[in-house]
Amino acid sequence: MSDQKKRNLSILGTDAFTGIKTQAPAQYAAGIPAVKVAIQHAMKEMGLVKAAKVLPKMNQKEGFDCPGCAWPDPEKPSKLGEYCENGVKAIAEEATQQTVDRDFFAKHSVEELSHWSDYQIGKAGRLTEPMLLRAGSTHYEPISWEAAYEQVAKSLTELIHPDQAIFYTSGRSSNEAAFLYGLFARAFGTNNMPDCSNMCHESSGVALGETLGIGKGSVTLDDFDQAEVVMVIGQNPGTNHPRMLSALQKCKENGGKVISINPLEEAGLIRFKNPQEIKGVLGGGQALTDIHLQVKINQDIPLLKAILKQLLHIERTEGDVFDHDFIQQYTQGYEPLIADIDTYDLSSLIEQSGVAVEKITAAVQLLAKRKKIIVCWAMGLTQHKNGVANIKECVNLLLLKGSLGKPGAGTCPVRGHSNVQGDRTVGIMHHVSPVLNQAIQKTFGFTPPDHQGFDTVHAIQAMHQKKASVFIALGGNFVSAASDSMYTATALQNCKLTVQISTKLNRSHLITGETALILPTLGRSEMDQKNGKRRFFTVENSMGKVHQSKGLLSPISNTLQSEPEIIGNIAHAYFGEKHTIAWKTLSEDYDQIRQKIAAVIKGCENITQRSQGTGFYLPNNVRTLDFSKLPNGKAQFTCCDLPQHHLEQDEFLLMTIRSHDQFNTTIYGLDDRYRGIYNERRIVLIHPDDMKTHGLTKLDTIDMMSIYNGQQRIAHKFLVIPYNIPKGNLAAYFPETNVLIPHDQYADKSHTPISKSIKVRIKLV
Ligand SMILES: Nc1nc2c(c(=O)[nH]1)N[C@H]1C(S)=C(S)[C@@H](COP(=O)(O)OP(=O)(O)OC[C@H]3O[C@@H](n4cnc5c(=O)[nH]c(N)nc54)[C@H](O)[C@@H]3O)O[C@H]1N2
Ligand SMILES: Nc1nc2c(c(=O)[nH]1)N[C@H]1C(S)=C(S)[C@@H](COP(=O)(O)OP(=O)(O)OC[C@H]3O[C@@H](n4cnc5c(=O)[nH]c(N)nc54)[C@H](O)[C@@H]3O)O[C@H]1N2
Ligand code: SF4
Ligand SMILES: [Mo]
């Protein structure tokens, strides 16, 4: 038996129930309850003094960027505070007073900790010093920074080929850290740079790149003020991008309309009580959604096709629906698209979508004569086998309406992690970019590898097959975030060394390679100083704007190092003094890193100066309607196939979603207030008719089983909650359900796991 097996680890942690309470789902988001909950989290984790110091600086000029989501700040931040309930939770989680130190690790074995829930593990607190888990050892022990760096360098040196190392990134790292990390991976000789984006908006990047020539969205915050229609598809902004509700509110106040497309009626899209306004606190707030299309899971393409077909009908009978000048001047593929739409039968499309015909007609009426349309989306579109096609169908609609490159219109993939977009901009990617490679060659004098590296799913497979054996993570919680938990765990356990550069304890510190290192780092909110000089770093928001972020709190421990320093020190330990890059000097001086970013990344010229104040926008060819890089210099229409799910009578499609009290694998609390679920995460939402068919009553316990390629995977113990969800569909939280998703089931082209459409059966236990 290997040392790993001897550790007798739990891959998933305890599955004990925590004491569920339920209520009717909420009919609005934010308001007084949000303020109350935010204060509770702030007080519990940070205490009054710290909270009072840190919150006024969040998302303010000269302050620090919220570590939550990537939603942009308004040009003129409010003096009342420019953050939301979940932003407060994010900062409370980071700036907690709880610490995980050497005594903690001496007291608790890795095996014991692995049996804790993710919630318990996260609440243990901030990591304070570098720790080493030796091969065969039961406990982590302290290690000096120097010895830790030597250990990493030694393991990297022992590899036969650089492609045996994997450099994972989660989207919270700064541009400076991510740039240096990508540079090190390339100098080391590999493009194995999987990142959280592979599990997230990769489908958006691929679809937008192929149709519009840039993998990012085109709208800016101001566009919401002017939009005539905003479509929110497969996204739950009330929980995951709460300040987006202010943008939707403004749109509505200016006469705009909101269409939401979602299998659930999410409270945040029903009504918003803006806590910054008297009428939001005392009054009824602002109704947001005008039309909710309750689509079945992964039937957005049939729905969008039904909408396009009806729009085409009005175009043919009345005209003035499509923007023919725009289509003529800027696009390619119009005729094939129209011919393709004509081949579909409207009633079959509508039936497949699961949406009532009157609702679709009402949406079509809203869209028909309006020209300024924004389409927003997130994981509800990207995490399916046909995730890329989902987004291309949205692009078709915008192209037909000429809704690009003008105020109030465009694409809005709403990004997750606060700097996930920036990390990509500065070079975190597994693909080869000849332009980037040339710029690196010119600036640094070495030639980066010219073959593609592993994305997330292929990195997991490579580790599983022992083709890769050193795994380094710049943030994140790989074992819990990735699909196929058991398979991913084995993959990591097959490694010789796993290294986690982290702020907080998580499961990836417990499910490790033969030897494991924890390298604790500074959080966003903490003061980053060198020789008495305060350093700042830069980030890019979901709309392509780059700005500065400067922490202000005293670090939780004076042993912590910043992310760029950790990367620089690893590189220094590996390459030594004689390398063409002076890693240590570079990593300590962020201005110098930015100068290199400016030299290498197009659009980042003078980044240090231009990122001051509210910052600057990166170039975006859609905003200027420049499609010169695409075939024939035109934006591309696409004929998308219908999604296929062959479900047996007793099979469901399961979507794995976020509760209101989590940030990915970080569990802030056990409530999902807007959905009326309290103090429990092991729940599954199901239609009352499906409960009847399966002989279930509320709060019965079921197991969920997925069967792919003859292999059964089981997620144990979920409490049944009757819910307004389409028949045949289920919803449950991740990461508890990641065990059900096979590692080889992912989106075509983007390789994003199918986290939102998993075929499962259920069994009463
Ligand atoms: N507080 C908080 N904020 C976060 C995060 C967090 O965990 N907590 N995570 C961050 C990250 S990394 C990301 S990527 C974003 C994620 O933000 P979201 O994408 O909003 O997150 P999910 O909970 O995955 O929600 C997906 C939504 O899509 C719907 N949906 C599921 N399947 C389908 C479908 O087939 N069609 C349609 N039309 N809708 C569908 C679900 O009902 C749900 O409302 O949020 C970011 N912000
Ligand atoms: N089934 C299912 N699986 C999913 C999803 C889903 O919807 N369903 N969503 C996917 C998505 S969209 C994403 S983005 C991934 C997320 O995947 P990851 O990004 O890997 O996971 P997180 O839970 O965000 O990572 C949290 C950890 O990051 C560390 N951390 C926090 N802040 C910092 C920091 O400033 N610096 C450093 N170095 N570390 C820090 C902390 O140790 C914390 O425990 O999960 C994916 N997995
Ligand atoms: S909307 Fe996102 S970035 Fe803004 S305060 Fe809330 S969590 Fe932070
Ligand atoms: Mo994400």
Image (spheres, rainbow, N blue to C red):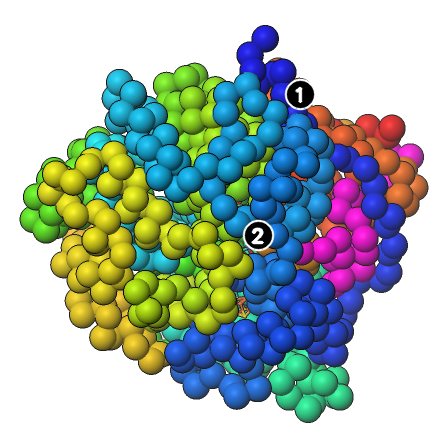
Q: Residues within 10 Å of mark 1 (few under 14, many from 20)?
A: some
Q: Please tell me whether residue 389 is drawn above or below residue 97 in the rendered image.
A: above
Which element is circle 2 on? Answer: strand
Residue 39 in view (yes/no): yes
Q: Mark 2 is on which residue type?
A: Arg
Disc 2 from disc 1: Cα separation: 25 Å
Which element is circle 1 on? Answer: loop
- Please state which of residues 282 and 445 is positioned toward the viewer in this rendering: 445
Residue 72 is situated, as x and y percent measured from the top left of the image, at 44, 71
The residue drawn where x is 17% and y is 33% is: 450
| Residue indicated by mark 2 | 126
Q: Mark 1 is on which residue type?
A: Asn
Relative placement, left or right, of 517 versus 403 is right
Relative placement, left or right, of 371 versus 86 is left
Residue 28 is situated, as x and y percent measured from the top left of the image, at 73, 72
Relative placement, left or right, of 67 versus 350 is left
Q: Which residues are magenta?
A: 668-695
Image quadrant of residue 622? bottom left
- Please state which of residues 577 and 308 is positioned toward the viewer in this rendering: 577
The residue drawn where x is 40% and y is 52% is: 561
| Residue indicated by mark 1 | 8
Q: Which mark is residue 438?
A: none
Q: Is residue 693 magenta?
A: yes
- Seen from this angle, which residue lies furthest bottom? 278
Residue 219 is situated, as x and y percent measured from the top left of the image, at 38, 70
The residue drawn where x is 36% and y is 30% is: 151
